[in-house]
Amino acid sequence: MNKKILITTLGLGLALTLSACGQKTEKAEPANSEVKVEENVNKNANKNMADAETKEESANKNMADAETKEETAVNKGAVANLDRGIAFDGFKKLHPDAKVESFQLEVENGKSYYKVDGYDAKNEYEVTVDAVTGDIVKDEFEAEDTSAKTADIQLEMIEAVDKFMDQALKDAGQGFEAGEYEVEFDNGVYVVSVEVVNGNKDITYEYDFETGKLIEKDM
């Protein structure tokens, strides 16, 4: 009788022990599962972050490319939709007695403008015209002694810019396009300056208007 009780007790103890071990093993599994889930979450988060950074870099590159294209396009004479003659005549209407001493197409902050400087017996004038819309952006004057000034640029001199621009483009070679230009009276000589551009490269040519000869080439 005692033997049976002992065997039964031992059997019950062994069963409890095995049951306890089994329970410990079952509890360990969720822990491993949680670790795997956390690892997957971290991997996904890192991947998403990497993808976001890649997209941001791509967006920045596209923006930079767009800005480069815009800068290049702005340097082209083609953005000056307004005929230069209208800007010249506009200056004359604002200041009928004034003579023109310089006329230029200039690019500032991505926009192109005609700038006309002139003078009369009492004042010096500076007029800026939007080269696309034709709006008068600035009309300023300053009282000055202009008695020594002799410049008198005419519209046909400004129209001749195209001839000098063609010469510059031919000399610069393939890939260059027309950029800014200026006609001015410098040390008793009418000078035509033209710029040609190719991406980030630009070359400026200065010509004697009267003789057509090249004065300077600046690369």
Image (spheres, helix red, strand yellow):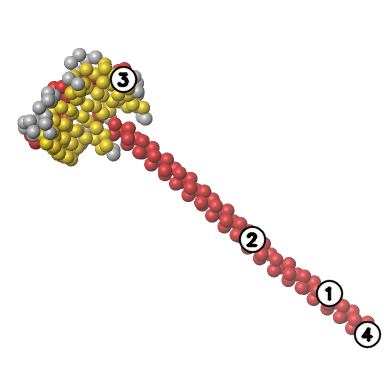
Residue in the picture at 27% in, 37% down? 108
Q: Is residue 53 above or below residue 2?
A: above
The picture quadrant where one finds residue 160 is top left
Amino acid at pointer 1: Leu
Label 3 – label 4 distance at C-alpha = 121 Å
Provide the residue designation for mark 3. Answer: 217
Q: Is residue 74 above or below residue 4?
A: above
Amino acid at pointer 2: Val
Instruction: Tell me if label 2 and label 1 are in contact, CB under 8 Å.
Output: no
Is disc 2 placed on a helix, strand or loop?
helix
Provide the residue designation for mark 4. Answer: 2
Residue in the picture at 17% in, 28% down? 102
Label 1 – label 3 distance at C-alpha = 102 Å
Asked whether 68 or 190 is in front, the reply is: 190
Label 2 – label 4 distance at C-alpha = 50 Å
Where residue 54 appears, x then y in whole percent? 48, 45
Provide the residue designation for mark 2. Answer: 35
Amino acid at pointer 4: Asn
Q: Is residue 113 above or below residue 216?
A: below
| On-image quarter of the N terminus | bottom right
The picture quadrant where one finds residue 213 is top left
Q: Residues within 10 Å of mark 4 (few under 14, many from 20)?
A: few
Where residue 74 appears, x then y in whole percent? 28, 34
Where residue 118 appears, x then y in whole percent? 13, 30
Q: Residues within 10 Å of mark 1 (few under 14, many from 20)?
A: few
Please report whichever mark, 2 or 1, sits nearer to the chain's N-terminal start. Answer: 1
Foreground label between 2 and 3? 3
Residue in the picture at 42% in, 40% down? 61
Please report whichever mark, 3 or 4, sits nearer to the chain's N-terminal start. Answer: 4
Amino acid at pointer 3: Lys
Please report whichever mark, 2 or 3, sits nearer to the chain's N-terminal start. Answer: 2
Residue 14's label in the rendered image is 1
